[in-house]
Amino acid sequence: MQSTDLTQIIDDTFLEISHSRKNYDSNIQFREMGVVKNISAGTATVTGLPGTGFEELLEFPNNLFGMAFNLDKDEIGVVLLGRNDQLQAGDTVLRTHRVADIPVGENLIGRVIDSLGNPMDDKGPISFQQRNPIERPAPPIMSREAVNAPLQTGIKVIDAIIPIGRGQRELILGDRQTGKTSIAIDTILNQHDKNVLCVYCAIGQRTAAVAKVISELTEKGAMEYTIVVVTEGNSSPGLQYLTPYAATSIAEYFMEQGRDVLIVYDDLTKHARAYRELSLLLRRPPGREAFPGDIFYIHSRLLERATHLNEENGGGSLTALPIIETQAQDISAYIPTNLISITDGQIYLSPKLFELGLLPAVDIGKSVSRVGGKAQLRAYRKISGNLKLAYAQSEELETFARFGTRLDQDTKKMIERGKRIRMIFKQPEMKPVSVPEQLLVLHALINGVFDAVPLDKITKAEALIQKKYYQLPDEVLQRIYSSESLNEVDEAILVMLAKEAITNILKLDSDE
Ligand code: ATP
Ligand code: MG
């Protein structure tokens, strides 16, 4: 070989080496690594990660994540977001430098997801453009506006007496199996033509109960505008704790786009229990009913995110319907009292009314809506006060009448009116009633149209009156939905139509 060739080869080799060196990417990543010290059901203690921030996500082996909850000097208490059967003491833990977040966006509408954004239906993967943190500060006061538009539930007793406004937080509470979920579901069903997006957040419920809700929503076509976020009862308490925050972030995304959104938390009792479990496992000091001291704060910071934004911020709203289960009708237990004071009112469901078959079992005396009255359609104003008073009076008189007192004509009339109000407020589930139909019936009620109808024919009479909705003149319909009150002529038309509808029932009765 000639010496020139050799030089050439050496030169080429050097060139190649220096070239590949320039392009060399070491692929080394610097990550802070700690070690699992011990594990209990749903939580773990980790050492060796001193810089970790509060609520930072930590990565465990097998794609398991955890959230830093207790930051002590030498170790961190971590809430695990998933099953920990494969985790062992001594496993490595990595910092991620980010907080828990959830995918948000239009593609979620109609889907069932878990609290980490994974699909739980069989409609395939979901594509996203954006992820939002699950915990965000509530909108500041300056971005908010008073609640001024109604959120119609389609449930007569609620729309008339305990009206809910868009951006309001109304608690639904009652013992187990008193119809709490049904009220929330009926409200979602009633939004089908109201341009309100709904998020149903199921926390720690039995799989069968959630499946029932989803099938009802699907059957009635409500999934077209609804997102369901589910954490089942057998999931880790960490995931159950996260669920309402994740669902709120999803709802908030739409509110910030100027839309009206309704969110249902079913239910926060289970959420509070999951948080208590985590706190006890992480050895936080227990307080009343063994709940940690900050249980009030975790619910208030969640519900503060529901609001009505002002025009500069898009004018969207987030209405929250949290659900709470009471034990033996005790509304003064720790969690119910907390939530009653956080929310803008409560709908209390009474097991006694449920037993009597007076469904929905709303206890009018114990229920209240503190801001919804101002947002209620003006067409309801006159009815609402009138009905509440008449009902309360008749209840009182009825108690009195039980002692065998002889009653005068007026008192008897009042008691009879009360019975009719109760009958009219009965409503089967999944049968929302539209505003004009409600007004026809309720105007008839306060004007004594039903007084001559025997109690067993009230339901039939009501159905006949509702059908008259098609005969309402356009201008009356317009006024019903506008910010104007109904004038005397409108009211006379409503009453006249109602009377017309039941003439046959009255005639039959007098013939008998
Ligand atoms: P849980 O405590 O188990 O969550 P819940 O308080 O949410 O129960 P629901 O599941 O809503 O109660 O309702 C309990 C039962 O009452 C159900 O079988 C439901 O079908 C029935 N129910 C609820 N509302 C009505 C209604 N307006 N008319 C007839 N039945 C109703
Ligand atoms: Mg329920």
Image (cartoon, grey):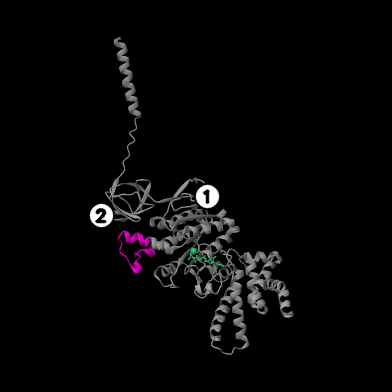
Query: Label 1 to label 2, Cα distance in Å?
Result: 43 Å
Q: Is residue 391 magenta?
A: no
Q: 4 or 244, which is in the foreground?
A: 244
Give the residue at mark 1.
Answer: 106
Query: Is any atom of residue 379 visible in this view?
Result: yes
Q: Position of residue 297 (x, y in %)?
A: 38, 63
Residue at point 53%, 56% (across, down): 214
Q: Quadrant of the C terminus?
A: bottom right
Q: Amino acid at mark 2?
A: Lys
Q: 7 or 465, which is in the foreground?
A: 465
Give the residue at mark 2.
Answer: 73
Counting residues from the start of the chain, the first of labels 1 and 2 encountered is 2
Where does the magenta region start and end? 275-297
For label 2, count other residues whose C-alpha is less than 10 Å away and answer few (under 14), some (14-19) or many (20+): few
Q: Position of residue 307 (x, y in %)?
A: 48, 61
Q: Amino acid at mark 1?
A: Glu
Q: Quadrant of the N terminus?
A: top left
Q: Position of residue 310 (x, y in %)?
A: 51, 59
Drawn side of residue 470 relative to residue 376, left or right:
right
**Under 8 Å from ligand 1: the CB of mark 2?**
no
Q: Secondary structure under badge 1?
A: helix
